[in-house]
Amino acid sequence: MHSSSLSSALVTAILVASMAAPRATSAPSTAPATAASPAKATRSGAPITRKMRAKDTYHGVSVEDPYRWLERGDAPEVKAFIAAQNAHARAALDELPGRDAIEARTREILGASSVAYTNLVEVKGQLFAAKTQPPKQQPFVVVMPDANSPEQERVVVDPNALDPSGTLTIDWFRVSPDGRLMICSMSKGGSGAGDAHVFDVATGKELEAVAGVNGGTAGGGAAWLPDSSGFFYTRYPRGSERPAADKLFFVQLYLHKLGAPTEKDTYQIGRDFPRIAEIFLDAGPGGALLVTVQKGDGGEFMFHLKAADGSWRQLADYQDRAVQMFFGERDDLYVLSRKDAPRGKLLRAPIAGFDLAKAAVVLPEGNDALVSDIWADNVVTINAGAVYTQFQLGGPSELRVTDLDGKPKPGPKLLPVSGVGGAVPLASGDVLFANVSFVEPKGWYRFNPKTGVTTRQKISTTSPVKLSGVTVLREMAMSKDGTAVPMNILLPKGKASGASLPFVVTGYGGYNVNIEPSFQALRSLFLDRGVGVAVVNLRGGGEFGEAWHRAGSLEHKQHVFDDFIAAVEHLIARKHAAAGKVAITGRSNGGLLMGAVVTQRPELFAAVTSLVGYYDMLRIELEPNGAFNTTEYGTVKDPAQFRALHAYSPYHRVQDGTAYPPALLMVGANDVTVAPWHSRKMIARLQAASSSTAPLLLVTTFDAGHGAGNSIDQEVASQTDAASFMLHALGVPLAQ
């Protein structure tokens, strides 16, 4: 439904109509709902949203929840709320002076004939990759002889051709050992709910499909049998196997034989895994299969191995603090461990009689953190007698090389202040790796360990934007408790340090995620207009290892917000940024960051743009995907964790009569990672509470989810809105 399909008068009447209040889940009040006058609007100009009287009691603390009714996304009154908010937002955003110039430049950048390659893998002398090439809306899979021969590439699977609407996306793909077949998990509308489709690599013809292999948070995967006759896959509950509330949980491992009906697929392992298990697969030599199981998103892992003879054994449990394992070249396994080593150490043990307690130390814990990323295949790569390992340096990262026993060897040449992608092994003994900086687009490089030569490849990303004149500074802000927090500061061309510029600041701070240098062409929308950009490496990430992550999770989450506030204050104190001229932006867990800091220090920011964020931290675990996050944020069932959650929960920290800065919240209607009702409740609470006339807007995008499957057109629309909104709030002319 288009946001303008309902007249504003009708929408207002619907929103303020008297309706029965939905039932609260814990100790609810039974008082009737209240209604606001249909003749009034909030001070920000938004339509009045009715309140209900609902409250919960947690450990003796009574908590009001006036907008609980907005959690019911399928209710007619909630649909009317969404339409009203979209209409209100469009009336504000579309009329911003010069917005057309931002939209034109955004479309020029995102729709340029630049290309980018990701997810590289070599099979049988052929290089497979996902390719992004505007104006195609979604990435597609290609195959070519090598990374220097893109002119010889051939399309294998193109979701744009399968669905011209542009909302079908490839979640992941796996190539069979013989190179003849490919599994693609594909989902629609940003849902992440993927089915596995088997394609013939030579013809691109679909041969068969297996339903329900991928989900929004638990993800999914597949691993081929060594003879390419079938594959193991992650299987979500089907039919009546589980209640509706459990359809995104209880993932198990099954085996599918090509040509057989999926009803005949055989169970392998997983019935005793946690409800919030996330399963990752890696096929090894001789038919061995490594199964990694993460408990939710909190970084706790156990490992199982299926031997070539079909027998199963558990290699490590959660308390062993192994976080990733990798097949070696000598019938052994390499283990990235954090046991008594918060910055990580690399171990090795033979597969036969594997005993983690007796594993040899290849790389002991050092000053820099070993990168761990379960969603990435190549943070440690063993190839041709060498070990390629990624290290975190507090934001920037680098690739180091050793022999199989950990003795240092010469490594590849890297860009300054840059981030590296894991090494992709090649049959020749060389490796491919990605390298990117804040001012240099991602390049793919080939490293020859015999000669020590690093060569840029033709598949390197091209960009219509040049940021070569931008100055990059690395500085440390001092957080509230005295912790030094790294900042990456980008100054526009021709601007010196201390120029007191308008600034846009972003951060994330969670889930052990490393925020590394990246080239983002859309930053030119700010930099070209004299606006600085800062990226902060907050606690909660993994930039300094597990201790850095733990210092920003569970009861310590407030450290993340303190770090971000300190970074903004540092920019102002050092006169990089002008006071009152700082806009902030974040996504997902970064959206929680936005909500927290704007409710704690509203006077500090000129504007906030928050995408697909968490805001009601007391009911997060009740949403379909919320259980996965309790390992990171905590649970209201635990008294101490409840107190921490309640203390910073953005929805509950909004104060009546406070002058909140301009805020733009953005969400996808099909988001299964973060429930869209978080944004609905948060904007309603802000609109009702704010004493300011500053705009407080919510944009809901249909046929979109958490962002990974967004089409180019959807990205043009959302990025135009965000950039225009922030620039206008900073007082920077949009037109040039």
Image: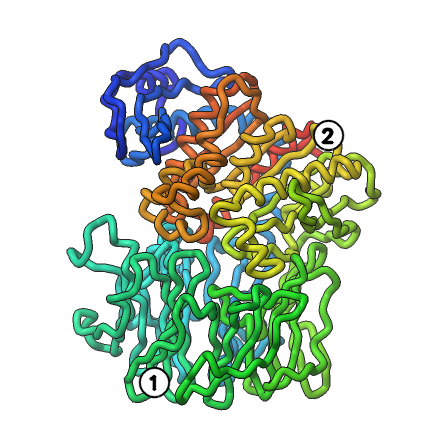
700 versus 123 height, above or below: above
Q: Please indicate, yes or no, whether residue 458 appears anywhere in the rendered image.
A: no
| Quadrant position of residue 55 | top left
Where does the image place residue 401, in percent across and percent down from the top left?
65, 79
Say if mark 2 contacts mark 1, CB within 8 Å: no
Q: Is residue 593 left or right of residue 449?
A: left
| Earlier residue among tags 2 and 1 | 1
Q: Is residue 85 left or right of residue 399?
A: left
Q: Is residue 673 left or right of residue 127?
A: left
Mark 2 and mark 1: span between their CA atoms?
A: 62 Å
**How are the residues colored?**
rainbow
In front of the other: 251 or 64: 64
Where is residue 472 drawn, in percent x and y?
76, 51
Q: Is residue 200 visible?
A: yes
Q: Which residue is mark 1?
A: 307
In the depicted structure, whether residue 345 falls above or below residue 82 = below
Q: Nearer the viewer, residue 524 or 560?
A: 560
Amino acid type indicated by mark 2: Ala
The residue under label 2 is 579
Identified at 52% across, 32% down, the residue is 664
Q: Amino acid at mark 1?
A: Ala
Observer-nearest of 689 and 702: 689
Question: Where, quadrant-wise, is the N terminus in this rendering?
Answer: top left
Vertical placement of 283 versus 685: above or below? below
Q: Residue at x 26, y 16 (%)?
A: 18
* Label 1 CA crowd tier, 10 Å (few <14, some 14–19, many 20+): some
**The image quarter in which residue 117 lies:** bottom right
Classify residue 19 by image quadrant: top left
Question: Which residue is rendered at x = 55% and y = 55% of the image?
Answer: 549
Q: 320 left or right of 52?
A: right
Camera-side residue of 170 and 663:
663
